[in-house]
Image (cartoon, rainbow, N blue to C red):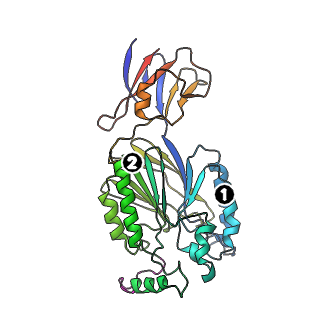
Amino acid sequence: MKKLLIIIGVTVGLNTSIVAGPIFSFGVVADCQYCNIKVPKTAQRQYALSPKKLTACVEHLNRLELRFVVHLGDFIDRDFNSFADVAPIYDKLKADHYHVLGNHDFSVADEYKAKVPAALGLKSRYYQFRYHGYRFIAMDGNDVSLHAYPASDPRHKAAEAFHKKLPSGTPSWNGAVGQAQLDWLKKALNEAKRAGERVILFCHFPVYPENVHNLWNAAEVLAVVRESRSVVAYMNGHNHAGNYGRLAKRHFVTFTGMVDTEETAYAVVNVHADRLEIKGFGRQKNMTLPIAGNGGGNETVNSRIIIKTADPDIALATDGKLGAAELQKSNDLRSWRKLGDVPKEAAEVLVTPRERGNEFYRLKKK
């Protein structure tokens, strides 16, 4: 039995090549920001077009194989009744779908502010979930906010006092992460480190690079993020123009706002072992974000591999659930998903740990 050592994408003997797809993919939408008001066609924010844009976005994402979709805040622009117009559209997503709280989501009458999280299907204002070696942490940048609480609420008074201490001219439409949430974040990041997980953070407000849209306590949040080697990316909305920065091998991505102009904006993030590939649609740009191996412990190895033979109609793919150790022990193709006829000369793929940032695989004929 002849063994061959190959690098992904290189054609080898038997007219067979290995093609590595993403480990998994997820969708990202930012600032749908709907409200039922008419504005001139020349206006930057086309609020009334958001349901149409969101419908087309959902229909497209439903045709893709996604593990989840996240909306990064400002689902509405104002008026609590606006939720009823766009929530049913978003809920048509076949994949699991999540919300992050934005400042405009609280631009409702005082008696409705406490009902906003439930209107978005949130049991908690900040939360986390895990998938395939990743921990996703959704933060609430409205802990300290001049929008999130009724004027009579002590938390509103505390936010006024907080804002007065900030440099003159600091926008009132940002917010801050409170101490209790910061403590929770530190705990979640420590848990990710112990579990050997990589972390992607979601928040409505950016923290880097320096920008007028940043959290009031961006420096404090950024310090927590930089302490964790598990964090590979921080993803947010709020700044509709989009933005990007890289700091200490961590990526800070501001996604383009859907509400702006007559053109849409959303993205699909393809998670690979060594990078995040952002495929943008509409005004959202494509991006490639290298992952420098700064995970919490164990390296993530791509278990989503496709074998393609010379026959273009034949292909097999893993089910995406096997870890590297399990693949290394695999002796047959029973765990592989059939995409076409089984090749006459079946092959098995054994994953080896990454060497110097490259992914190597051994292919052997059965």
Q: In this view of the protein, can residue 9 be seen by the observer?
A: no
- The residue range painted magenta reads 164-173
Describe the element under mark 2 as helix, strand or loop.
loop
Write down the quadrant of residue 86 in the picture.
Answer: bottom right
Neighbour class for label 1 at 10 Å: few (<14), some, many (≥20)? some
Instruction: Say if 94 sits above or below 121 in the image.
Output: above
Judge left or right: residue 191 versus residue 259: left
Task: Tell me the quarter of the image containing the N terminus.
Answer: top left
Rounded to the nearest angstrom, the CA distance separating label 2 from label 1 is 29 Å
Q: In this view of the protein, can residue 140 be seen by the observer?
A: yes
Instruction: Say if 288 sits above or below 362 in the image.
Output: below
Neighbour class for label 2 at 10 Å: few (<14), some, many (≥20)? many
As rendered, which of 15 and 126 lies closer to the eye?
126
As rendered, which of 231 and 322 lies closer to the eye?
322
Q: Position of residue 320 (x, y in %)?
A: 51, 36
Is residue 36 shown in magenta?
Answer: no
Q: Residue at left 38%, top 42%?
A: 274
Instruction: Say if 88 sits above or below 199 in the image.
Output: below
Q: Position of residue 246 (x, y in %)?
A: 35, 57
As rendered, which of 220 and 308 lies closer to the eye?
220
Q: Residue at left 57%, top 75%?
A: 106
Residue 91: numbered disc? 1
Describe the element under mark 1 as helix, strand or loop.
loop
As rendered, which of 68 and 178 lies closer to the eye?
178
Q: Residue at left 53%, top 68%?
A: 101
Give the mark count.
Answer: 2
Give the residue at mark 2.
197
Q: Residue furthest top?
A: 1
Q: Position of residue 171 (x, y in %)?
A: 44, 80
Residue 285: numbered disc? none
Q: Position of residue 350 (x, y in %)?
A: 41, 26
Identified by mark 1, the residue type is: Asp
